[in-house]
Amino acid sequence: MSTRITIKDVSRATGVSVSTVSNALNAPERVAEETRRKVVEAADRLGYRPNRAARSLPKGRSFTIGYCIPAGRDGLFLDTFLHQVTERASDAGMDIHLFTPYRGQSEVDSYREMMRRGAVDGFVLSGTVHDDERIRVLLDSRTSFVTFGRSDLAENHSWVDVDGRAGTRAAVDHLVDQGHSRLALIGWPKGSLSGDDRASGFVEGLEASGLPFDARHLIRTENDLAAGREAASLLLDAVLPPTAIVTVQDVLAAGVIAELHARGLRPGRDVAVTGFDDSPPAIYSTPGITSVRQPIEEIGRRIVEFLMHDLEDPEPIRRSDLVEPELVVRESSTGAQQP
């Protein structure tokens, strides 16, 4: 029995990417004529025939990736993430279609509507939660998608994620090295997989350093400046307040900095502060905020690459990539610790 020739075979034979092969065969105006000729000749020589029915794409390709704008996340990081995904998608000959649920429509139903209309070829998801219904619906419909963030579902799917646990643990290790022994965490409400992952890294970091975990020093709140400031106020009013505060997002860290300034305390000297994402609130704050940097360009590239493989391969292999973050140290966590 003969082996079916796939688009990956054409890619290997020509030395160009899978997405370039797809463009050459389906949208030739997107590639140079010399590249198109090389791909077409290789496809003919190998006997490649695309199997569109196997991918259940409605009425041909739309060359569009769908992304539902999430609620309740920092807009600055989302802007950076979307910029990178859009650039990488453009390189692959794809466009990004942003959508939100209609008034009175659930988020899951908005995905169903996109699929019913054949508006997109596949989806990028972010902000994964426990038992994520979006993922269940897309798996059941055999629709191509990649998530930015892991899931806890038994079914396999493609994802790219940052090791948030390692990121917050690096922040804890850094603060302990600075001499701190009373650390607190301001995290997201339970249910966010990335938020829970970052909280786990905080607890692990304390345990590895032989420090006790005090549940009173863990506050879960929404992701905005006012919430970060209110959480900091609760921590600082404690009988034995923390000397260092780890947060799971830069906007929360900026709220902590604002509360410290309001109390006449010096960030980095009286109380150390760290954030997560290395976004503009961390870079341009006074003082600059120590933050866990996510390699967002690499994340965007991998997400689009995984999705293109899934779209083009009649029997796609589920792919995953856990990316290591980097702690960027600034003034908010350095300086002499006060008694």
Image (cartoon, helix red, strand yellow):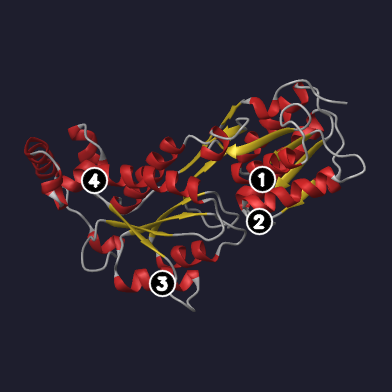
Question: Tag 4, which secondary structure?
Answer: helix
Is residue 324 visible in this depiction of the protein? no
Q: Name the residue under label 2.
A: 222
The residue lying at 77 percent from left, 26 percent from top is 176
* Residue 7's disc number: 4
Marks 4 and 2, how far apart at CA: 45 Å
Frontmost residue, 125 versus 234: 234
Amino acid residing under circle 4 = Ile
Q: Name the residue under label 3.
A: 112
Q: Nearer the viewer, mark 3 or mark 1?
A: 1
Q: In this view, does 56 lie above or below 91?
A: below
Give the distance between the C-alpha atoms of the residues marked 4 and 3, in whole angstroms.
28 Å
For residue 65, above or below residue 322? below
Going from the N terminus, do you reach mark 2 or mark 1 first? 2
Q: Where is residue 23 in the image (x, y as percent from the top left)?
A: 18, 47
The reply to whether the C-beta atoms of the residues labelled 2 and 1 are less than 8 Å apart is: no
Residue with the mark numbered 1:
255
Mark 1–mark 4 Cα distance, whole angstroms, equals: 50 Å
Q: Residue furthest bottom?
A: 104
